[in-house]
Amino acid sequence: MDKNGKILNDKESTTKRWLEHFTEVLNGENPSNPKSETEIKLPDEVGEIDTSEPGRAEVRKAIGHPKNAGKVPGIDNVQAELLTAGIDYAITKDKKIIDVMWREEKTPDKWRKGLIIKLPKKGNLEECKNWRGIYAAVSRQ
């Protein structure tokens, strides 16, 4: 359904409407009264944060305990279990990418692509506001 309540029947206009909807939702305006750094209370137990370049052990730990194990792969079609099966190779390749990102302070352009899966909420499902967008994947290539 478009913003005026008109039912959209063709795939092209429906796709354009979803793009419009999620662009509005995800690129909303900044809060009118954002909190300053001095207003934000951090827990007392927060210690020093290590900002040094990640080492092989840290990369191994991240690959060895993937959050997405057993889930559908992302748009790169790489499953978490594939990385853990060849962990030494994955560490070497991922560490090279991480090192470049660390030095250049930017991520690869391909990583900026992702998928938004729409999940129904309650209400009239012909209205975009009754759907929730879930970020589903990012390309690792």
Image (cartoon, rainbow, N blue to C red):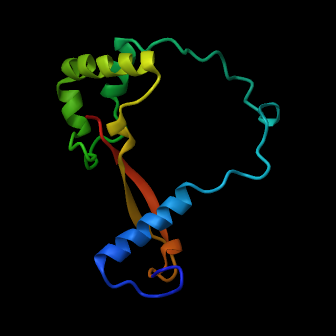
Where residue 107 appears, x then y in whole percent?
A: 40, 30
Which residue lies at the image location 27% right of the left edge and 19% below the top edge? Answer: 91
Q: Nearer the viewer, residue 139 or 104?
A: 104
Q: Is residue 21 above or below residue 80?
A: below
Q: Hey, which quadrant is residue 50 in on the image?
A: top right
Q: Is residue 90 above or below residue 78?
A: above
Q: Is residue 14 above or below residue 76?
A: below
Q: Is residue 48 left or right of residue 131?
A: right
Q: Is residue 20 left or right of residue 97?
A: right
Where residue 37 appears, x then y in whole percent?
A: 77, 32
Q: Is residue 101 left or right of residue 130?
A: left
Which residue lies at the image location 33% right of the left edge and 85% below the top edge? Answer: 9
Q: Nearer the viewer, residue 83 or 108?
A: 108
On-image quarter of the C terminus = top left
On-image quarter of the N terminus = bottom left
Q: Hey, which quadrant is residue 76 in on the image?
A: top left
Where residue 55 appears, x then y in whole percent?
A: 39, 12
Q: Is residue 103 above or below residue 11?
A: above
Q: Say how many tags the image has.
A: 0
Where residue 49 appears, x then y in whole percent?
A: 60, 18
Q: Nearer the viewer, residue 111 or 74?
A: 111
Which residue lies at the image location 21% right of the left edge and 17% below the top edge? Answer: 88
Which residue lies at the image location 22% right of the left edge and 36% below the top edge? Answer: 81
Residue that sits furthest to the bottom in the current view = 6
